[in-house]
């Protein structure tokens, strides 16, 4: 019984410490993850995971290890923010892997990429042929940014001489049969209005809808459940 209490206590402390650390270090740990950030996340998980099953490691050692590791990461983040010259060394730098339509093999090899991997990254950005690409930049998080050649680039409204329209944000208002009340309230919409709009399109209850989206000036976009499907 005591083992369960010890594990529960250490797990709770580890959870709180990891949560506090992610809040302190910021969202870049997830949204702009670099190879070092990835390793850092693994180490943090290992510190807690291994400690749970080692009876000689107490809560104090878990907190100490997490705190020390967190301080080291925080110091490194602070250094890269204050001294720009350290960023390329500590965080890496973007690499131009395609320059003026030509593959930069030197940068490609330095980044440990081959042609097939580069093609995969380009396809993920909608470039299915090398001939479409004028520039491709390999970012520090492993993604690629693509600038297509003019004949393959999407035309802008200015180029097509189309009058600009006001940009309006689409808002999810139903998800998996449930009304997203917070989203309705944020845009001063009501559930009564939503139910009325559903009836206009032949539906009587939100539970018939897997997803609904509202955009100012546009009719509601609805995706009903397929016949025989139900809300999960």
Image: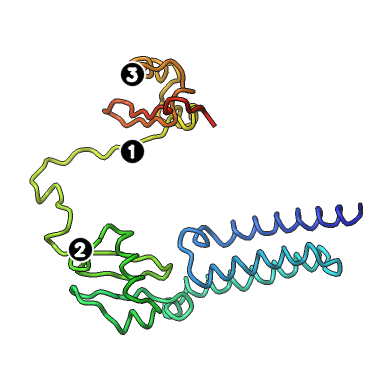
Do callouts 2 and 1 mark residues in contact (Cβ within 8 Å)? no
What secondary structure is marked by label 1? loop
Task: Tell me the number on the disc at residue 148.
Answer: 2
Residue 225 against residue 106 in the figure, above or below: above
Q: Quick one: which residue is furthest to the left in this view?
A: 161
Q: Nearer the viewer, residue 99 or 112?
A: 112
Q: Nearer the viewer, residue 70 or 143?
A: 143
Seen at 75% across and 53% down, the residue is 12
Position of 16 compared to 193: left or right? right
In whole angstroms, how far apart are the C-alphas of marks 1 and 3? 22 Å
Seen at 26% across and 28% down, the residue is 217
Q: Percent from the top left, x then y, of residue 38? A: 54, 67
What secondary structure is marked by label 2? strand
What secondary structure is marked by label 3? loop
Dot 3 or dot 2: first in sequence order is 2
Position of 199 compared to 205: left or right? left
Q: Percent from the top left, x then y, of residue 99? A: 22, 75
Nearest-to-viewer mark from 1 and 3: 3
- Find residue 214 and report its image quarter: top left
Seen at 18% across and 64% down, the residue is 132
Q: Report the residue marked by disc 3.
A: 201
In whole angstroms, how far apart are the C-alphas of marks 3 and 2? 41 Å
């Amino acid at each position: 019984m005591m083992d369960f209490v010890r594990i529960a206590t250490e797990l709770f402390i580890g959870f709180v410490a990891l949560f506090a650390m992610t809040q302190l270090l910021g969202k870049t740990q997830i949204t702009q993850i670099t190879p070092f950030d990835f390793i850092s996340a693994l180490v943090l998980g290992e510190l807690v995971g291994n400690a749970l099953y080692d009876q000689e490691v107490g809560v104090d050692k878990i907190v100490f290890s997490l705190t020390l590791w967190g301080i080291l990461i925080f110091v490194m983040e602070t250094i890269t923010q204050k001294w720009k010259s350290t960023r390329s060394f500590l965080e890496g730098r973007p690499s131009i892997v395609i320059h003026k339509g030509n593959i930069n093999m030197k940068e490609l090899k330095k980044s440990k990429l081959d042609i097939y991997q580069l093609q995969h990254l380009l396809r993920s950005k909608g470039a299915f042929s090398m001939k479409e690409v004028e520039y491709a930049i390999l970012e520090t998080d492993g993604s690629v940014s693509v600038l297509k050649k003019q004949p393959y680039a999407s035309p802008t409204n200015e180029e097509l001489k189309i009058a600009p329209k006001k940009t309006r944000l689409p808002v999810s208002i139903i998800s998996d049969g449930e009304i997203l009340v917070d989203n309705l309230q944020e845009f001063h919409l009501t559930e009564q209005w939503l139910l009325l709009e559903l009836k206009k399109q032949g539906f009587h209850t939100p539970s018939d809808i897997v997803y609904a989206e509202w955009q100012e000036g546009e009719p509601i976009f609805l995706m009903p459940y397929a016949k025989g499907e139900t809300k999960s």
